[in-house]
Amino acid sequence: MVTNLLNYDAKSLADFCVEIGEKPFRSKQLLRWIHQFGISEFSGMSDLAKGLREKLATLAIIEPPQIISDHVAMDGTRKWLLSVGAGNGIETVFIPEANRGTLCVSSQVGCALACTFCSTGKQGFNRNLTVAEIIGQLWLANRALRDNPRVAANDSDRVVSNVVMMGMGEPLANFENVVTALDLMLDDHAYGLSRRRVTVSTSGLVPAMDRLRERCPVALAVSLHAPNDDLRDQLVPINKKYPIKELLAACLRYLSVAPRDFITFEYVMLDGINDSVVHARELVKLVQDIPCKFNLIPFNSFPGSGLKRSSPEAIAVFREQLMQAGYVVTIRKTRGDDIAAACGQLAGQVKDKTRRSTCVRAEILS
Ligand code: SAH
Ligand code: SF4
């Protein structure tokens, strides 16, 4: 069986080189060809001996997920629907801004954690993505954006200057594969991104937050969404297992090694549910010991959600409460509305997994 080299980090690639009778340092050359130059054919790797190139062509492949569709929104946001086999699709979104280009990467097909406001959660869990499928999203985006400068970010060195693990799935529930992909994002021979520019977003898997702290501390965003356990139990069911007190303690432990000196708390703004002044005050009290920033995310609707986005006025008042308490607060801009590329909409416009698979399959076959 041929080996997909996109599954390998530097160490595994060096082991692979030794296995096929080559010097381990070849892995650095291979990493650069694969990840920096985005080459998928060994024949193009001009500083490798011809014999090695031929050997690699018989033993290995460089295979990212297959692109099913590619849409660019009016605001430049670009969304790819990718096939990961068996009729399953995942989505990757590129968000160009004046001084950076952010890629929103998926980590699972579906998600088991079933947050009530999340379209991916409504699909249920299907499977974890492989390393090749996770890093393949960055690989494909870099390649596509290089070919298409009209959606490139203006002033950044790299078209994709930042990665956020905020696509489909819970990254920390697919720990090993996500961390291997993170290692590649940080590796100077691969993507060379700084830890501060790679963010993992989690709904709060406390033991895995501790493991991430030890293994690969990148920037951390935590999906808080509620100022007390009663409400968070309803919105983010994993809270019943890891309640807010434990979650905040894990945040403090994380901060001891984090590349940024704050945690970003994400807070989805749901009309009449978690968006009152009372909620905002409770939130301020709750996080008083944690160096943090807030990112308020206006709820992005999807068919059958039964929920509504908070009004702009309610969001402004909520924000003001947090700012008066001294916090930096951003309101996430709704991007790519016309192509359903916003947070929590990444399961596409279908109601359940069966229909989604059919839809993806239909696109693959067409
Ligand atoms: N599983 C991880 C990362 C993926 S979701 C997590 O939950 O953090 C990325 C962010 O989008 C999370 O903060 C999530 O709560 C938020 N989100 C999910 N569905 C949303 C929706 N419909 N509208 C707005 N934000 C949503
Ligand atoms: Fe999973 Fe995150 Fe969606 Fe919750 S918000 S269901 S953890 S992807």
Image: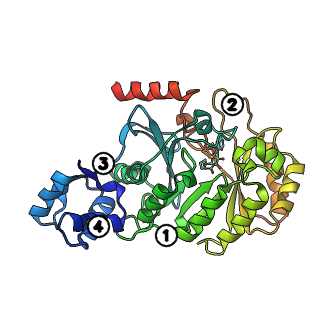
Q: CA distance from mark 3 to mark 4?
A: 19 Å
Give the left or right position of residue 354, taking residue 286 as reference.
left
Q: Are marks 4 and 1 in contact (CB under 8 Å)?
A: no
Counting residues from the start of the chain, the first of labels 4 and 2 encountered is 4
Classify the position of the C terminus by image quarter: top left
Q: Are marks 3 and 4 in contact (CB under 8 Å)?
A: no
Q: Secondary structure at mark 4?
A: helix
Tag on residue 209? none
The quadrant where ligand 2 appears is: top right
Give the left or right position of residue 78, taking residue 85 as reference.
right
Give the left or right position of residue 223, taking residue 17 as reference.
right
- Residue 285, position as x, y percentages in the image: 86, 61
CB of residue at label 3: within 8 Å of ligand 1? no
Q: Secondary structure at mark 3?
A: loop
Provide the residue designation for mark 1: 194
Amino acid at pointer 3: Glu
Q: CA distance from mark 4 to mark 1?
A: 25 Å
Amino acid at pointer 1: Ser
Provide the residue designation for mark 4: 15
CB of residue at label 2: within 8 Å of ligand 1? yes
Seen from this angle, which residue lies furthest right?
278
Q: Residues within 10 Å of mark 4 (few under 14, many from 20)?
A: some
Q: Residues within 10 Å of mark 3 (few under 14, many from 20)?
A: some
- Residue 152, position as x, y percentages in the image: 43, 53
Res 270 quadrant in image: top right
Q: Are marks 1 and 2 in contact (CB under 8 Å)?
A: no
Tag on residue 63? 3
